Image: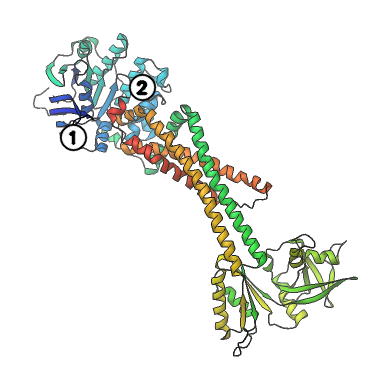
Amino acid sequence: MAAAEPPLIELVDVGRVYRRAGSGRRGVETRALSDVNLRIAPGEFVAVMGPSGSGKSTLMNILGCLDRPTQGVYRFQGRDVGRLGADERAALRRESFGFVFQSYNLLGSATARENVEMPAAYAHLGRALRSERAEALLKAFALGSRLGHRPRALSGGEQQRVAIARALMNGGRVILADEPTGALDTKNGEDVLAVLADLSTRGHTVIVITHDPEVAAWAERRIDLLDGRVVADRHTGGAARAEAGGAVLGPDPLPRSGRGRTRLDFERVAESLRGTLASLRANLLRGSRLRTALTVLSVTVGVWSVVAMLSVVQGGYRASVETVSRIGADRIFIRSGVEYGDRESTPVRLTLADAEAIGRGVDNIRGVLPHVSGQFTLRHADRLVQAMVQSALPETLVIEHLGLSRGVFFSDRDSANQEPVVVIGAAIRDELFPTSAAVGRHVLVGGTPFLVKGVLARFGRPGSVVEDYRDKKVLVPLGTAQALLFGRETLDAITVVAENPKRVGETARAVDNLLARRHGHRGFNLSSDIPSMIGFSTVERLMSALMGAVGAISLFVGGMGVTSVMLVSVGERTREIGIRMATGARRQDILRQFLLEAVAVTVAGGVLGTVLGFASRIVFDAFDVPAALSLWFVFAALACAVGTGLAAGIVPARRAAALDPVAALSR
């Protein structure tokens, strides 16, 4: 090797001091490395030797960008590593370094293939390319039949070979092996060393941390550490490696051009979701089933509370609107006339044109009903009944929330042609047709025969106040009423029905202004039951606030459950986080993983809570509680679940992302 060749790795006066809290101002200091100067060229096979506590592992952590020196300069390919940020060091680990640990540091929840694929996943390689590469590497290490096995099903030698394959996944320009044979028997240890020696001959820079002279004999260069200082640095020739002859390794390192083949954003998102589900299944659904189930249950209860309360509020609102409609609090009644004492104005003549103008020119209108009405005697055979006959339009059925029990309602043609047809209420039908069908029969209205076209659905019990008002209605087409019954085109009144009852006062002012402009003066009276509407609105706001508070408290409790589970999970999975960081995961990768896991747990609870919320309609109906369910409840519930997951998961996720890789790996 030429002396002038630029070093791949260069350490200049590197030192590392650890500080922990103590009685002094600076606490207690422990010096792990002092004034280390090293230059390692590409392709070297180096053994770093020393007794326990000599600083070997600290040196490896600094070389592998897991740790930073507190003094001196570390350059990799001429770059000052000490000036790099956390994500830049993660990128360097991902692209240039591969770690082989004494305890293997494989993820117990992942298969051999998944463990090997991990560094490439953080490098954003396509799934197919990752899988192909991982399979080729494992087959090269005679593990082709163990692709789907998890670490507990592999021997120590097999696990270490999986770790070496993982180190090579992204190319592994520098292989850092920390006591790679410490947990292996002699035969497996020699096999692993032979693989590392062969990697060196293929151009990889291999650095082995060991205290065993027999392991160091495989290297071509030996560096001795004592009390954090380099006490010897010499070339050994690698005699043992020469005798072993080297192992046969399969595919070449992944080319740099292949590493740059990134995927589209939506593919990355899909890959993140797949990884999250796999991690969730392995860590929360297998290892912490009861805890996870209780967490999902708490979120389920919270979301169910939200959906149930929303449905009750919605149902209560609709019931109040219906009640408001029944008592007329959502309506504006317009009649011809002037206020008492007004001697200057004259009553206006209300017409159908006024009604049409209101429908076109005023907002918040659900319907406009022009009326002519009067008391008439209805007769069929020898039966007589006194009833209020009122004009109607085809849309009256919808606007007035009326239903038909028999027959059909009027059409526009009936009114235009002044057809003598009538729709009667249930109480009128009982009086005139107690034992026979009413539809298709004729009744005399003021002596004029009318065909019964339909019968309104019953509103109340016989004899009740509601029956007197609703069930004794007699409706006639407007054109027919004006021509055959009343003989005039002017209207007795106009009823305006507000779309939003809360805005009935605003709508009344708009109607008043419009009619005043049309007639030039206010020769009409407007009336509405605004105080009743105010009362209903106040009750609705109070109920909404109460129900919302109950749902919010339930969601808060569920969120605290998610936070506690994720915090415990971070503590239990500290070593996993360290492994992921060592293989190139950035802080945002760890943050995203734990956030997505929290969201996944809450979404599961959200889905179950939504289903329970919709199913609770059966219970509400059984106890006669007004409830109404809408499709938007689903989106509201899932939004609550996702929001709860993000809020509850942010603290554990940030804690996981902030872990120091070295400290995490040491647990």
Q: Amino acid at mark 1?
A: Gly
SS assignment at label 1: helix
At horizontal 85% and vertical 66% (from top left) the residue drawn is 431
Which quadrant does the C terminus fall into? Answer: top left
Identify the residue position indicated by label 2 in the image. 138
Q: Vertically, is 647 above or below 471?
A: above
At horizontal 15% and vertical 34% (from top left) the residue drawn is 78
Compared across the picture, whether 1 is left or right of 358 comes to left
- How packed mark 1 is, by other alpha carbons closer than 10 Å (few <14, some 14-19, many 20 or more), is some
Instruction: State which quadrant residue 51 falls in.
Output: top left
Pick whichever of labels 1 and 2 is earlier in the sequence: 1
Compared across the picture, whether 278 is left or right of 125 comes to right
Residue 391 horizontal/vertical position (percent): 72, 74
Identify the residue position indicated by label 1 in the image. 82
Instruction: State which quadrant residue 85 falls in.
Output: top left
Residue 172 horizontal/vertical position (percent): 26, 27
